[in-house]
Amino acid sequence: MSGRMQDAADIVQAATGARYDVAVAGGGAVGAVLACALADLGATVLLADPWMGVRNSSPAFAPRPLALSLASQHVLVSLGAWEQMACDATPIESIHVSEAGRFGAARLGARECGVARFGSVVAAAALGATLRDAVARRSAIHCTRGRIVDADVAGDLVASRVIETPEDTSFSFHASLLVVADGGHSELRDSLGIETTMRDYRQSAIASVVAARTARVRTAFERFTPSGPVALLPMGGARYGLVWSCAANEAQALAELPDREFARSLDAVFAGRFGGFDPVDERTLFPLRLVRAKSIVDERVVLVGNAANHLHPVAGQGFNLGMRDVACLAEVVAAARRDGSTPGDAAVLERYRRWRRPDHASVARFTDVLVDVFCHRFSPVAPLRAPALVALDRAPGLKRALARRAMGFGGRVPRLALGQLP
C-alpha cells in the first residue's frame, strides 16, 4: 500500500473467511498505533472502523488538543510515526498547577526532573493524519470500513463478522486474538457481555483552541475551579489547547456563548493573568464519566484504551494510559511469537492482564481522587488544598516522582515506551 492517506476507495477489502493473527475493532489513535506495532512484529492485522477512509470526519480525531506523555511520544518514535508530526508538536517544558481563588501553586520544570520535556501537545487531527499514513505503509494491515460484531471462540481462533458501512453488507473472518479498541462507549465490549462500572461526574468538557494575549511558551497549566479543572496546553506561539471541565449545565451554557463572552469567562478563571484570550477553533462538548471494564481480558479477547478505562481528562492521563496498553500488549505478543504461542492464548492474555492491572488501578484512582479533592467548593479537605500545592512546590523529590509517573515511566516500563522495539 502507498504511504499516502487512504480514501475510502483505497481500503483493502478483506475476503470472507480470511484469517488474521489479530483483529482490532476501532481505528482511533490507540487502535491504529496497536495495528502498526503488531504489523512490525510480523503479525497480520485486520483493522476495522466505521470511519475508516473518511477524511476529517472520525470522532476519534475531532478538533481537540492531545497531551502526549514522553512515553507515548517514544512509542510513536519507535514506530516511525513521530517525525512526520514533530514540527506540529509543542514540547511541554514546565507545568503550573493552581487553584482559582486561593494562593499557592505548584510548578514542575522538566530539567529539574532530569528530562528536556515532559511530553508534547499535538492536535488530534494531526495525529490522525500521521497514523493514517503509518497504517497505509504497512501491507500486513488490512483495513475495512465497518464494525466488528459477534465473537465465537472455536479452538485456537475467534470467529467474527464485520458489518460494512455504508453498504450494510457483511463478511466473516477468523483471528487468534480480537482487540476491542472502539472507545469508552464500546458497543462491541457490551455485546460480548463484558461488564463495566460507571461513575457519572455530572460534568462535561469543552475542548477548543484559544490564543492568549500574554503567552507563556511551552508551559502547560492546570487550574482547579469549584466546578472542575481547566487545562491550557501549549500549541506554539500564543495558541493553547483548552480542555475546560465543569458542571454539565454550565458547560452547555459556556459552549453556546458568543466568542467574546466565552473569552471573557475564560480570562476570569485565570484572573486575567494571560491578558485575555481570543477563540481560534470551534468548541467540542463531551460528557465526563469514569467507565471501567471489570475484566480487560476474556477468551481470545482483550480490551485496550478507553474501552478498558474511560477516565476524567484531569491531568491528561487517559490517552496515555491507552498508549501504554498498546506498548505492553505488543511486548507480550512479541514474546509469544518468539516462544511459539499465538497472540490469543490464555497464558499470553494473563501476562498482559497482570502487567496492566496496577497501572490501570492507580491511574483511575488518581484521577478520581483529584476530581473529588479539587472540584468541590465545600470538600472537607478544601482548607488543605492550597497548602498541599505549596508543599509540593517545595518538595523536589516528590515532584520528580510524580513527573516520572505522569511521563509514563512508573512501574515496569514496556520497551516501546523507551523508544525500543519489543
Image (cartoon, grey):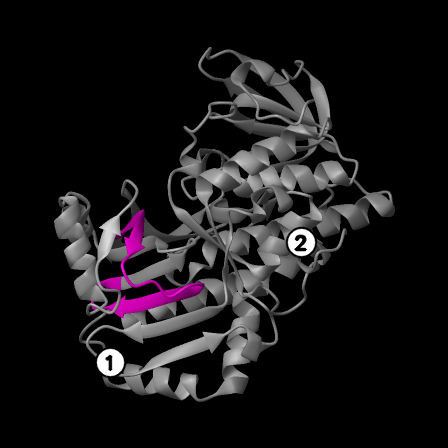
- Disc 1: CA contacts within 10 A as few (<14), some (14-19) or many (>=20): some
Q: Is residue 404 shown in magenta?
A: no
User: Is 278 placed left or right of 135 in the picture?
Assistant: left
Taking 26 as reference, is 415 above or below it?
below
Residue 300 appears in the picture as rendered: no
Residue 75: x percent and y percent? 65, 51
Q: Earlier in the sequence, mark 1 or mark 2?
A: 2
Which amino acid lies under the numbered mark 1 shown in the image of this protein? Ala
Magenta: main secondary structure equals: strand
Taking 302 as reference, is 92 above or below it?
below
Q: Quadrant of residue 47?
A: top right
Closer-to-camera residue (256/313): 256
- Disc 2: CA contacts within 10 A as few (<14), some (14-19) or many (>=20): many
Taking 312 as reference, is 369 above or below it?
below
Q: Is residue 211 shown in magenta?
A: yes
State the SS at label 1: helix
Q: Which mark is residue 259?
A: none
Residue 417: x percent and y percent? 66, 57
Residue bearing mark 1: 382
The residue located at (70%, 49%) in the rendering is 78
Residue bearing mark 2: 328
User: Is 216 placed left or right of 72 in the picture?
Assistant: left
Residue 87 appears in the picture as rendered: yes
First to last magenta residue range: 204-228
